[in-house]
């Protein structure tokens, strides 16, 4: 059981299992998994934002979003490598440069994907954009595989060290990387909330989400707003990509698939179309998955997440914070 | 009539833009080039190598140049008269069923017997490699036909279709391992089991609309694969399971009979031929495909088939007309799933071995690509597409690494160009009886 303590950080688990050697008690595991779950969940939440915003605005599941995250993980590694090549060694500059670089380039990816694969299909059949998105997902995976090679890639550890709290006979370990992830994800979500709540762009987004036709009658360039939404979603996925890459250390061209579905689960859990729902759903899914991995079985944690997705969609398709969908003729 | 006015309008517009708007094209080209540079620059130009990297600027330059040239050509082409007509057709994609004349006789009536004849004498001339390729093609025909019922006819996007395929394949492997069942007893059982699984999955998800259904089925397919992968004691996990060779009325095709009795080559008094097993699978598979084709052909003309298509077009209208949407959807799911179960049994005995890597999401996407390419709802299209998508990669071994990329591009382009597939679904029209015609004419 100890070998499966941490679903996110492959490198920590050896250290933890060697040090504790069976002395962990249940509440220690529980709290440790809580911390792991919150870290994982905040990242799921960031990716889920992309799904939920796109769904809210054009009613389509952007199947390629998981692969946009995958591309951003590669971009993060490339950014780190290039910046350190040019002599940027101090952590704040390195991470800031990488973040800006990754977010900008991934944003352009979001824009280009929308223009190429989805925009021409605005007035097509219902299944057309979804199938096109699946095609786009295959394209992205294969494109990265061909240009970067099929092998696993990695980045060096950027933030060493951890904090440790004793609880009973066990303890909870908080690596600095995890603290950084929690803070960065929180800042990212706060900026997004401000953007949607308080700016003109956000108001336009909300208007288009409520009624696309009416918004365009009132003079909003809906095509442009949809492009912005794709860019914002991709930028959030890019933030998640940098954070996960920092924590996990390794990734490959297939990494987007599983994380994409889990982030979609998070979006559905919170109520698809709702921004706070996506963040909230991400946290709940992350914690539930980590607790399942710690308490029951880590081999089946993906099965657990998928089963959770199926159950939510069947029992409460509108999610926790969403409103039920009424079809009108 | 409308097409005439349309042509007139387009003609006027083309008249107005008689000279090309070169400036606009150039700006579009530059923007496309800039975007291509940003998109391809880091990922294509900087290849990670451990924690360091290699520069590859030449590749970026090539790709950017190609994108810019393509954009310029497209931009100029769209300003010509033909280009504008084409773009008009794209934005107003017509989406009807093509109706043939009432006395139309399909040319397939002539072609079908020829195809069957060719297929039956084919194994006599083919070598083992060719037979295995064709078997694989036929397996995908079966899968495509099954998914075509679910996606093409009933309009339910099923992304976990490979799960039912896995149920069929593992049904044979596990049935042999634990119950001692063989090919023939599992064949119907697998179809029933997969159909049952289809009902089991279908029943709770029927309330969901299109996109949600896609994700739930995707989750279901992944759950099946993960369980097969992780349940080491029962399914053998990633190591997989052996599958018995098929037998014909208890006669085996191996060099020596494992279960006693005489193997077929001794019975027929000829030398041992390792191809015999594949020829046998081929023949049985071909007969099953023919049967499925016939059943599907009949189903689309039965009330249930009409109900599937009606439900695809408008669910609310269907329900207000009194159709039981639960039954209609469930039947589509179950029939599609049982076809995949059949295909799974053939796949397992063709490979002689099953493991979970054969049942990834990519497989589902490939089958979906077959259905999309062939034309949703079109049987002939699906058969052709299945062969093209499975046989073409065998022919183009040197392009194997671009296979997935090509599938992806094909799916995106098809959705833009012909969202209903290459071969349009056509239906023979009905001519009113003479008396009715006279009455209509008189009024």
Image: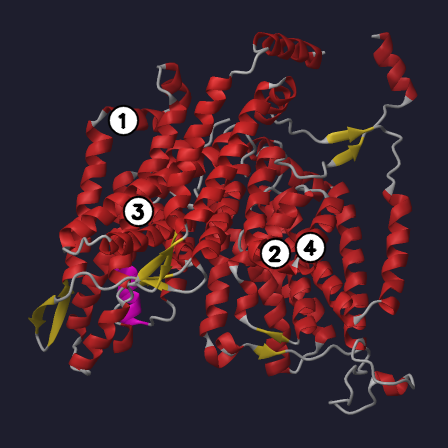
Question: Are dots 4 and 3 in contact, CB under 8 Å?
Answer: no
| A234, above or below A246, in the image | above
Q: Chain of mark 4?
A: B
| B68, above or below B409, in the image | above
* Residue A56 on image: x %, y %: 37, 35
* SS for callout 2: helix
Q: Which residue is mark 4?
A: B392
Q: Which mark is residue B399?
A: 2
The part of the image, by quadrant, that contains residue B189 is bottom right
Q: Is residue B292 left or right of residue B109?
A: left
Cα separation between marks 1 and 3? 20 Å
Q: Which residue is mark 3?
A: A238
Q: Is residue A289 magenta?
A: yes
* SS for callout 3: helix
Which region of the structure is painted magenta? A287-296
Cα separation between marks 2 and 4? 10 Å
The part of the image, by quadrant, that contains residue B52 is bottom left
The part of the image, by quadrant, that contains residue B156 is top right
Number of the front mark, 2 or 3: 2
- Tell me which label, 2 or 4, sits earlier in the chain: 4
| Residue A231 visible, this orientation | yes
Q: Which residue is mark 1?
A: A201
Q: Chain of mark 2?
A: B
Q: Which mark is residue B227?
A: none
The N terminus of chain A lies in quadrant: bottom left
* Residue B110 on image: x %, y %: 91, 45
Question: Are dots 1 and 4 in contact, CB under 8 Å?
Answer: no
Cα separation between marks 2 and 1? 45 Å
Q: Is residue B14 left or right of residue B442?
A: left
């Amino acid at each position: 059981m100890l070998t499966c303590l941490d679903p996110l950080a492959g490198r920590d688990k050896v250290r933890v299992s060697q040090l504790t050697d069976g002395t962990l008690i249940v509440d220690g595991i529980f709290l440790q998994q809580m911390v792991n779950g919150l870290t994982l969940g905040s990242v799921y939440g960031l990716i889920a934002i992309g799904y939920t915003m796109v769904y809210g605005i054009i009613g389509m599941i952007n199947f390629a979003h998981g692969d946009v995250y995958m591309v951003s993980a590669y971009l993060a590694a490339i950014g780190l490598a290039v910046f350190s090549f040019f002599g940027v060694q101090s952590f704040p500059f390195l991470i800031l440069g990488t973040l800006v670089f990754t977010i900008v380039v991934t944003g352009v990816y979001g824009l280009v994907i929308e223009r190429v694969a989805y925009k021409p299909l605005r007035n097509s059949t219902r299944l057309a954009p979804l199938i096109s998105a699946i095609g786009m997902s295959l394209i992205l995976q294969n494109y990265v595989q061909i240009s970067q090679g099929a092998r696993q890639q990695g980045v060096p550890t950027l933030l060493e060290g951890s904090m440790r709290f004793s609880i009973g006979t066990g303890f909870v370990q908080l690596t600095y990387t995890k603290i950084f992830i929690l803070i960065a994800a929180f800042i990212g979500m706060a900026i997004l909330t401000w953007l949607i709540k308080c700016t003109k762009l956000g108001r336009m987004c909300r208007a288009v989400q409520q009624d696309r036709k009416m918004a365009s009658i009132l003079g909003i360039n809906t095509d442009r707003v949809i492009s912005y939404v794709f860019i914002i979603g991709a930028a959030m996925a890019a933030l998640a990509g940098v954070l996960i890459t920092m924590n996990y250390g390794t990734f490959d061209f297939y990494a987007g698939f599983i994380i994409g579905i889990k982030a979609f689960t998070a979006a559905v859990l919170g109520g698809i179309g709702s921004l706070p729902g996506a963040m909230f759903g991400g946290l709940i899914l992350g914690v539930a998955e980590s607790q399942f991995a710690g308490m029951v079985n880590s081999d089946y944690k993906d099965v657990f997440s998928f089963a959770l997705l199926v159950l939510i969609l069947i029992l409460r398709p509108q999610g926790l914070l969403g409103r039920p969908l009424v079809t009108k003729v | 009539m409308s097409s005439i006015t349309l042509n007139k309008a387009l003609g006027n517009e083309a008249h107005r833009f008689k000279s090309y708007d070169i400036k606009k094209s150039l700006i579009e080209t530059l923007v496309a080039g800039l975007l291509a540079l940003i998109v391809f620059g880091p990922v294509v130009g900087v290849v990670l190598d451990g924690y360091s990297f290699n520069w590859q600027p030449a590749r970026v330059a090539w790709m950017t140049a190609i994108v810019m040239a393509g954009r310029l050509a497209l931009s100029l082409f769209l300003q010509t008269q033909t280009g504008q007509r084409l773009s008009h057709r794209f934005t107003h994609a017509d989406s009807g069923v093509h109706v043939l004349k009432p006395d139309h006789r399909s040319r397939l009536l002539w072609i079908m017997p020829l195809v069957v004849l060719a297929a039956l004498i084919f194994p006599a001339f083919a070598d083992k490699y060719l037979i295995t390729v064709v078997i694989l093609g036929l397996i995908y025909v079966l899968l495509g036909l099954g998914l075509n019922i679910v996606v093409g006819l009933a309009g339910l996007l099923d992304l976990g279709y490979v799960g039912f395929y896995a149920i069929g394949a593992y049904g044979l492997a596990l049935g042999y391992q634990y119950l001692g069942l063989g090919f023939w007893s599992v064949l119907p059982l697998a179809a029933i089991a997969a159909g049952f699984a289809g009902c089991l999955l279908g029943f709770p998800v029927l309330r969901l609309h299109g996109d949600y259904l896609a994700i739930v089925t995707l989750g279901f397919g992944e759950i099946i694969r993960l369980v097969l992968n992780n349940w080491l004691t029962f399914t053998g996990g990633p190591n997989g399971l052996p599958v018995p060779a098929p037998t014909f009325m208890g006669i085996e095709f191996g060099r020596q009979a494992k279960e006693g009795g005489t193997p077929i080559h001794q019975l027929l008094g000829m030398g041992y031929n390792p191809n015999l097993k594949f020829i046998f699978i081929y023949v049985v598979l071909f007969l099953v495909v023919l049967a499925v084709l016939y059943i599907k052909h009949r189903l689309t003309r039965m009330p249930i088939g009409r109900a599937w298509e009606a439900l695809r077009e408008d669910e609310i209208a269907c329900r207000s007309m009194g159709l039981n949407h639960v039954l209609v959807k469930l039947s589509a799911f179950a029939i599609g799933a049982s076809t995949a179960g059949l295909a799974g049994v053939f796949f397992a005995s063709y490979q002689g071995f099953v493991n979970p890597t054969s049942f990834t999401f990519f497989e589902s996407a490939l089958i979906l690509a077959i259905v999309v390419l062939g034309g949703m709802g079109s049987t002939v299209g699906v058969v052709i597409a299945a062969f093209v998508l499975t046989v073409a990669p065998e022919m183009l071994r040197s392009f194997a690494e671009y296979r997935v990329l090509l599938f992806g591009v094909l799916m995106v382009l098809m959705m833009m160009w012909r969202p209903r597939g290459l071969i349009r679904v056509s239906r023979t029209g009905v001519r009113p009886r003479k008396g009715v015609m006279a009455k209509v004419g008189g009024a």
